[in-house]
Image (spheres, rainbow, N blue to C red):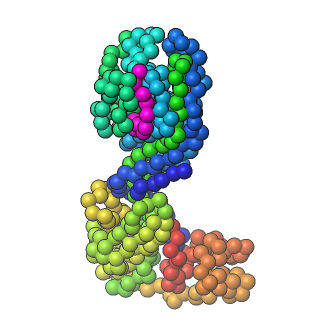
Amino acid sequence: MRLITYTFATRLIATIGAITLAMASYSATFTGSGVGAIADGTNSTCPGPGAPLNITFSATGLTSTALTDVRVSMTFGTAHAWGGDISATLISPTGVNFPLFGRIGAVSATGVGTSANLSGTYVFVDPAITTNNIWTAAANVGTGDVVEGTYATTPVGGDGVVNPPTPTNFLAAFSSLTTPAVLNGTWTLQMTDNCEMDTGAITAASLTLQQSAPPLQYSFAPTSIHFPTIPANTPSYAYPVVVFAPASNAQNIGFPANACVMSGTNPGDFMRVPDALSVAPGATGQLLVQFRPSSNGNKSATMTCTAQPSGVTPAQIIVQLDGAGGDALPPPNCYDVDGDGVMNPLVDGLFITRLQLGFTPQAAANNIAFQAPRNTTKKVAGFMLERCGYVPPSTP
């Protein structure tokens, strides 16, 4: 169990650009399976470990970011007398393992450790969260119950270990796990009794993994728009820059009406249609751009659009624009899409009908044999966009 707290233009050569934004963190808590009695140790001379109790956690939904917190909770529903017998180790799906504690109080190779009881719920965390030391807590109660609570991880007792030992770097042990392939899967809490005579049982356990949330992202296309030659002071059709936001985003990506600025040689000859744009997770939207040459000749500019939320750096769409002012082109025959002089109902008519039904140009051209001079889908679609006012659908 897991609980989570948290148009088309064929003449426009598309290159996808991605921008990321910072987000808060989130955590997922996974309930352990396989709780039960911890098998007794096999030797009165410690350590003589018995068969381990393997409690598993099925982790899902973790993403490509590093862990920012790891917490393991265990409940000794049946108290284990002589807590110095017990050791606990967390093992990742790929086998990275790290002891939470072990042989509390043992400072020699065969030491029996503390006689304090483990009874109730204990949570083990990185020492950045707390410096509470379970060795100190055990020493404070003698043969009583170690106080329930949250403790820093500590090394396994044995030869050369001091009492109390310095807490260990729990989080750092798993810092190399940064992809879904190694984070998701079966984690294991391995409980071992290292000395015979005393027993106990785990009745509940959980694993909490916290990450920085995946970054907000969006992509856009194209990165350049080539407008046709049109008469001076005549506006072109609006060309789209398609913005796509993946479903993993946690909030909308926005471009206010004043989000775009023109720069370069002829910034006054190009304009973004000033409509505010907000793209929801998993959705697409369009920034529309027009060309209105002030005079004959070649024109160029760069459009830079800054995304919201504010404070993100960088967060820009940059599109190169060019076109030309010149003599008016002859009126197009938009019913002869391939320009072969024949308005064929199974070619021109079928293609136009499909467009009217909302097909993309690629889909509308399926199984249609266009003739010269516009004998490819790219040429036909470019003609429809530039000369006939075709408005493409909102697809990236």
**Residue 368 sits above or below residue 202 on the image:** below
Residue at (29% x, 55% y) in the render: 313
| Residue 201 locus on image (x, y percent) | 53, 33
Please tell me which residue lies in front, 257 or 78. 78
| Residue at image coords 47%, 59% | 248
Q: Nearer the viewer, residue 75 or 324?
A: 75
Asked whether the viewer can see residue 59, the reply is: yes
Say which quarter of the image contains residue 167. top left
Residue in view at x 41 percent, y 62 percent = 250
Residue farthest toward the front in the current orientation of the protein: 144
* Range drawn in magenta: 115-126
Q: Quadrant of residue 128?
A: top left
- 348 left or right of 109? right
Q: Is residue 221 visible?
A: no
Q: Residue at x 54, y 50 (%)?
A: 1
Residue 113 picture location, percent across and down: 41, 17
| Magenta residue check for 91 | no
Q: Quadrant of residue 184?
A: top right
Q: Nearer the viewer, residue 396 or 330?
A: 396
Looking at the picture, how far across and down is residue 199, in whole percent? 53, 26
Residue 304, above or below 115: below
The answer to whether residue 117 is magenta is yes
Labels in figure, total: 0
Q: Nearer the viewer, residue 343 or 153?
A: 153
Q: Main secondary structure of the magenta part?
A: strand
Q: Is 294 situated above or below 189? A: below
